[in-house]
Image (cartoon, helix red, strand yellow):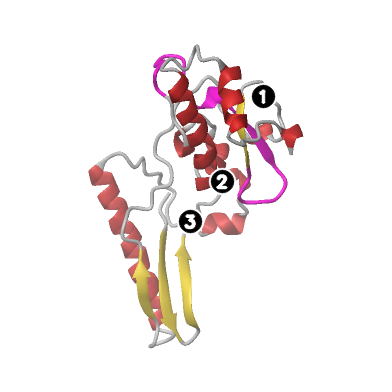
Amino acid sequence: MLVSWYYFTGKKGYDLRGLGYIEAPDELKSEEEKVRSLSRRHFQGVDADEISEMMCLSHESLLKDVLEKRSQDDTYLPVTMATIPQLRMTRRIEGIYAMTLDDDRKEFDDSVGMVGNWRKRGPVYEVPFGCLHGAKVKNLITAGRSISANEPMWEIVRVIPVCAVTGEAAGVAAAISDDFTAIDVRELQKRLKEQGVKLFYDEL
């Protein structure tokens, strides 16, 4: 979704100004948070023309905001703005399994690590190996924000700690085999444990 941000300085000092709300899917937002959205449009992030349009709209919203703030404070100035497209998620695989928010504390025999919910304390998710690969392309494996997850869960798995957990699992798996549909998951888990990875909730 469309988002814009910049750092500014003015009478209130130096701070970050964020425009637009995209930290959660609509069903998890309050009515006030929905109003903060800059646009109802979704950008796919895989087409150069569309990405350019998204950047122009983002900068346009930034300019409008700065002009509005300067009408109230003539010392208000933008200091730093985003210089790359603000694309958090573009494509993800259709895996053997798709993670969901309901998987909190759910046990998976093929777990390759655990992750939390960066937005709130409490939830713990075992990451099944089946969400790192699909059934059709046997030698393709992925990690981070491109693993198999439904829309609400995608917001959880797109962040760096999840990328680290799934990246380590994908790397070790690739060292074992190039057919991820037939890999010996027990061997994969054994090697991950040797590297200090906690695989199951009851290990916490």
Q: Which mark is residue 37?
A: 3
Q: Which element type, helix, strand or loop, lies under badge 1?
A: loop
Q: Please indicate whether residue 48 sits to the left or right of residue 197 in the image.
A: left
Q: Of residues 138 and 66, which is closer to you in this image?
A: 138
Q: Which residue is mark 2?
A: 26
Q: Amino acid at mark 1?
A: Phe
Q: Provide the residue span drawn in magenta.
A: 116-140
The residue under the point 47% across, 39% down is: 145
Q: Residue furthest right?
A: 202
The image quarter containing residue 38 is bottom left
Residue 22 lies, in percent from the top left, at 50, 52
Query: Label 2: few (<14), some or many (≥20) within 10 Å?
Result: few
On screen, residue 27 above or below 31: above
Q: Which residue is mark 1?
A: 108
Query: Label 3: few (<14), some or many (≥20) within 10 Å?
Result: some
Magenta span dominant secondary structure: loop
Q: Is 81 covered by the magenta stretch?
A: no
Mark nearer the N terminus (2 vs 1): 2
Count of marks, rendered view: 3
Q: Which element type, helix, strand or loop, lies under badge 3?
A: loop
Which image quarter is the C terminus in?
Answer: top right
Q: Please indicate whether residue 109 sits to the left or right of residue 188 in the image.
A: right
Q: Is 137 covered by the magenta stretch?
A: yes
The residue under the point 56% across, 22% down is: 188
Q: Which mark is residue 68?
A: none
Residue 141, visible in the rendered structure:
yes
Mark nearer the N terminus (3 vs 1): 3
